[in-house]
Image: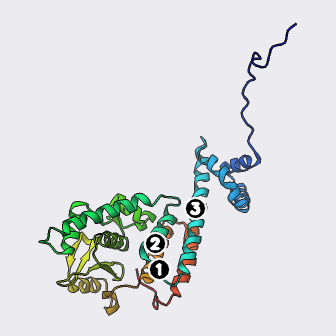
Amino acid sequence: MMRASPREMPPLPHASPSPGPLDLLISLLSDESPTVQGAVRRRLQRLGKEALPGLLRGSRSQDPVLRARCRELVLERGRERAARRLVRYALHARHDLDTALLLLDDFVDPGRDPRPTLRAIHAMGQEVARRLRRRGQTPAQVLSEYLYKERGFTGMESVEPAPGHASLARAVETRTAMPLVLCALWRRVAATAGLRCELLPVPGHVVLLVRQPDGDQLVDPFGDGELIEREHVLGYLSAHNLPFQEEWLKPAPTTSMFLRHTLNTAACFRAIGRRGEVRRLARVVRLLAGHPEVPIQPLG
C-alpha cells in the first residue's frame, strides 16, 4: 500500500491559538467586581510596557465593556508618558510656548500626530503673509479679517470646560477654544507670516498684542477677533470685580503662560472627574511655579 506524499496529505484543520496568560488576565477587566478589576489593574501596572500588546488587543475586543476598559488603560499609559515628557520640559531653564502647547496636546490626546496641525497653521500663516503684501489694512486687521471672519476662529460657546478646549490641535479642527489657546494659535499664524505678536495675561481672558510700525494693536481672538483698546480691558476687569494691575497689560513671560495653560488643562480634567490626570499635571505645576519667570501664580 502506497503512502501519500506530504503534498497529497489532506490539510489539518486550523486551530485557533489559545489565549496566553496576559490575555486571560486582561479578560478579567470585564468582571463587574471592583475588587477583581482593582487587582487586575494593579497587576497590569506592575507589568508596565509588557502589558501594552495585550491591552491593544483587548481594545479591539467584541466585548464592549472589555474594549472600553482596555482603551481607557491604553489612554492612561499614554498620558503618563506625556506627563513625564512635560516634567522633563518643565525642568528646562527656558521654554517655548509652541513646544509647551504641543506637549500638553499630547497629554490630552496621547499619540496624536501633530504634523497635520502644524501644516494647517503654516498654510494659514502663508495666506496671511500673502494678504499683508496687498497693503491697505493693518496687520491686526488682516489677522482679524482672515482668522475670524473667513476661517471662523473664535471663543467656544460651551461654558462647561472639557479637555478638548485646552487642545491646540482640536482648536484648529473645531475653530473654538479657550482664550489662551486661541491667542497662541493666532500668534503662531502671525509668526509664520512674519508678524510679531505677544500674549497679555488678562485674568481669565488672554488678549493678543500685535506689534505694528504705526502703533501696536490689541486683538481679542476669543471675542470674535475684535480690535480693542486699553479701555475695553479695563471695562472687562471692572465687570468681573478685578482690581487693575499694570502687569496684565504687559507681554507675559513664556513660562508663566506655560504654567497657566497647564492649570487650565488640569481644570478641564478636574471638571470631568479625572483625578489621575490632575495629579499627573500637578507635578508639572509645582516645577513651573518655582521658575524665576513666575514670581506670582497666574490667575484663570
Q: Which mark is residue 95?
A: 1
Task: Measure how far apart labels 2 and 1 are at the Cα level.
Answer: 8 Å
Residue sitting at x 57%, y 50% = 68
Looking at the image, which is closer to me, 161 or 146?
146
Q: Quadrant of residue 190?
A: bottom left
The type of residue carrying mark 1 is His
Q: Residue furthest left?
A: 136
Q: Point out the image quarter for the C terminus.
A: bottom left
Q: Which residue is mark 2?
A: 99
Looking at the image, which is closer to me, 90 or 94?
94
Q: Which residue is mark 3?
A: 78
The type of residue carrying mark 3 is Gly
Does residue 169 lie above or below 257 as drawn? above
Q: Nearer the viewer, mark 3 or mark 2?
A: 2
Q: Earlier in the sequence, mark 3 or mark 2?
A: 3
Residue sitting at x 78%, y 19% = 6
